Image (spheres, rainbow, N blue to C red):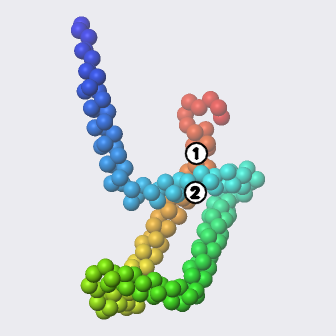
Amino acid sequence: MTTPTPMPTGLRILLTLASLIVVATGIWAARPILVPVLFAAFLAIISGPAMTWLIQRRVPRPAALLMVVLGMAAIGVTVVIVIGQSLYSFRDNLETYKEPLQQKVAAITDRLTEAGVEMSESALADNLNTDNAVDYLKTLLGSLTNLFGKGLFVLFSFVFIVLEATGFPDKVAAMPGDTSA
């Protein structure tokens, strides 16, 4: 019986690096699914103790799940309200930012003209046109729709993970050959 010859060190390092590149590329390609699933797992880990505490207090599992989901939703709504208030405040103060911005644009235009850069006022006005707001609004609505879809995916993943995590000890105890039950 012959013993296999060991791989050269350089080949082992090369294979390890190639494997790491393949794994990193796979993770990069899976990020549209992986990020929401990891976020749902993070939320489930955070809310797991509350769910376990409720179940230990003999709250039925569906009611405990509903309470935990509503609690997480309340936290999410609070965060959205705080961010929304900040955005509304910014929108209300937008007029106060408009005049200093126009002054800065005029100063930059004057400096560029002094430096010999030809720039028409219409080209600058086109870039700062308020008609672009419609395009921004379309992009915003598309992003919000995408966010809503991902939010539903996170919610369903979160519910599944929490239910499976809280039921896992019962499943292990029901396995044949388990002596801990």
Give the secondary structure at mark 1. helix
Picture quadrant where residue 94 is located: bottom right
Residue 46 location in percent, x, y?
62, 54
Q: Separation of disc 2 and disc 1 at Cα?
A: 18 Å
2 in relation to 158, above or below: above
Residue at 33 percent across and 49 percent down: it is: 26
77 in relation to 172, above or below: below
Q: To which residue does mark 1 refer?
A: 168
Residue 15 location in percent, x, y?
27, 32
Residue at 60 percent across and 83 percent down: it is: 89
- In the rendered image, the quadrant that contains the C terminus is top right
Picture quadrant where residue 60 is located: bottom right
28 in relation to 139, above or below: above
Residue at 43 percent across and 79 percent down: it is: 140
Give the secondary structure at mark 2. helix
Q: To which residue does mark 2 refer?
A: 43
**With 60 as the anchor, is 29 left or right in this view?**
left
- The residue lying toward the viewer, choosing from 157 and 79, is 79
- In the rendered image, the quadrant that contains the N terminus is top left
